[in-house]
């Protein structure tokens, strides 16, 4: 890959129930202690499930996104001119509950929110919004990486946010998607479902040339990406994992890497029976006999499912794991499931002996994404 085509990650920030900042996120996923507690943000009387991974003392989503973007841009070392030359790709829910926005802002639509965030943070490039459910953030990263690699843009700030709120909570609870036992158990026997969690994150992506000209440190690169859809069922993935496998294979092709180069997978695994089994099947399709020896973890078991923000939060987890040489823990394990014959990281972090990792995300409707991260 030519140097000018390499997509670098030069700035990051994240908020979750594990705390604020990269250090808190990394420490939480390495400890593997779930952050699920009783919901105090709104009334859960009458709900089957009453827990989620919520951060204390959060502001409005608009305010937290503003803070995340500003902190990621500062971490990347961008001055006023660098900010002005940056685009903003925003992933968040399309519903009105995303707001209230700060006083004085215009009508609360997602495109308006993106424009306000860009203006407040000094980003003068184009804006885009993504409301494609649980692949929103990973789709935004894939688009940003494609435009940077092609030379259409030099720099994109990708931001994503979801704060647990009553409407989506009620929908997931009524649909019996939430884990009635209050624990997320990815790939495990006895798994009951997912639990929601706060997630607000931002990353700065830029071409290697742009980063080099200003002497910016590269944390990692987005070396490959893939998107696919299996269109199997509105709510269930294809049992053979066809869509997710195609997304992973596309990411490998774009990165110019064979499957055996991957040494870690941050799985989408939500702790739901059908989804986890489908993902295990996808890994077997891509990695063959090596799938059972490839270290895999799902940090949703610790920080919860951040819906539209999941892809960005988990991209940061993957980058941090590779850079710090430790692979995070999957919480909630009860025992092996024959449908998920994977090497799931449990009990304690493992040494990371790889420069390349995949992070997966999937959404209702059969949408699938894979991002390939490299620290080489």
Image: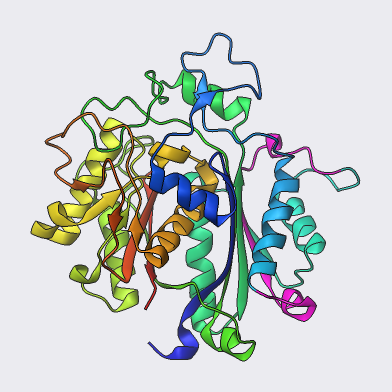
- In the figure, residue 223 lies in which quadrant? bottom left
Residue sitting at 55 percent across and 85 percent down?
Answer: 151
Q: Is residue 121 visible?
A: yes
The N terminus appears in which quarter of the rendering? bottom left
State yes or no: residue 98 in magenta: yes
Residue sitting at 32 percent across and 60 percent down?
Answer: 247
Q: Furthest-left residue in view?
A: 289
47 horizontally vs 288: left or right:
right
Q: Nearer the viewer, residue 221 or 335?
A: 335
- In the figure, residue 130 lies in which quadrant? bottom right
> x, y (%) of residue 296?
26, 51
**In the picture shown, does residue 229 fall above or below 257?**
above
Residues rendered magenta in the picture: 77-102
Residue sitting at 27 percent across and 34 percent down?
Answer: 274
**In the picture shown, does residue 222 fall above or below 102?**
below
State yes or no: residue 248 in magenta: no
The C terminus appears in which quarter of the rendering? bottom left
> x, y (%) of residue 252?
29, 70
> x, y (%) of residue 32?
38, 41
Q: Is residue 130 visible?
A: no
> x, y (%) of residue 352?
29, 62
179 horizontally vs 145: left or right:
left
């Amino acid at each position: 890959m030519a140097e000018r085509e390499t997509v670098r990650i030069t700035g990051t920030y994240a908020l979750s129930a594990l705390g604020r900042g990269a250090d808190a996120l990394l420490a939480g996923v390495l400890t593997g202690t779930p952050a699920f507690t009783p919901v105090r943000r709104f009334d859960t009387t009458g709900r089957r499930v009453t827990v989620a991974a919520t951060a204390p003392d959060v502001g409005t989503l608009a305010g937290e996104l503003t803070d995340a973007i500003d902190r990621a841009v500062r971490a990347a070392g961008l001055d006023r001119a660098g900010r002005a030359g940056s685009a903003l790709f925003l992933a968040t829910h399309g519903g009105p509950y995303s707001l209230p926005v700060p006083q004085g802002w215009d009508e609360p639509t997602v495109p308006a929110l993106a424009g306000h965030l860009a203006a407040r943070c000094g980003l003068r490039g184009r804006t885009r919004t993504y409301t494609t459910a649980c692949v929103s953030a990973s789709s935004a990263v894939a688009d940003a990486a494609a435009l940077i690699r092609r030379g259409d843009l030099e720099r994109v700030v990708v931001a994503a946010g979801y704060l647990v709120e009553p409407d989506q909570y009620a929908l997931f609870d009524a649909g019996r998607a939430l884990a009635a036992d209050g624990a997320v158990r990815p790939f495990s026997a006895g798994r009951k479902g997912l639990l929601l969690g706060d997630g607000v994150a931002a990353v700065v992506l830029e071409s290697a040339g742009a980063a080099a000209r200003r002497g910016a440190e590269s944390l990692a690169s987005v070396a490959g990406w893939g998107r696919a859809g299996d269109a199997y069922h509105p709510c269930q993935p294809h049992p053979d994992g066809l869509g997710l496998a195609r997304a992973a294979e596309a990411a490998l092709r774009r990165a110019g890497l064979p499957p055996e180069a991957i040494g870690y997978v941050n799985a989408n695994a939500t702790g739901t029976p059908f989804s986890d089994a489908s993902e295990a099947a996808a890994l077997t399709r891509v990695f063959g006999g090596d799938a059972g020896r490839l270290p895999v973890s799902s940090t949703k078991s610790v920080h919860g499912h951040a819906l539209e923000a999941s892809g960005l939060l988990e991209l940061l987890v993957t980058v941090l794991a590779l850079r710090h040489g430790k692979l995070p823990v999957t919480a909630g394990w009860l025992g092996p499931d024959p449908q998920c014959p994977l090497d799931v990281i449990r009990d304690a972090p493992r040494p990371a002996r790889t420069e390349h990792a995949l992070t997966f995300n999937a959404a209702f409707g059969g949408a699938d994404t894979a991002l390939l991260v490299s620290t080489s």
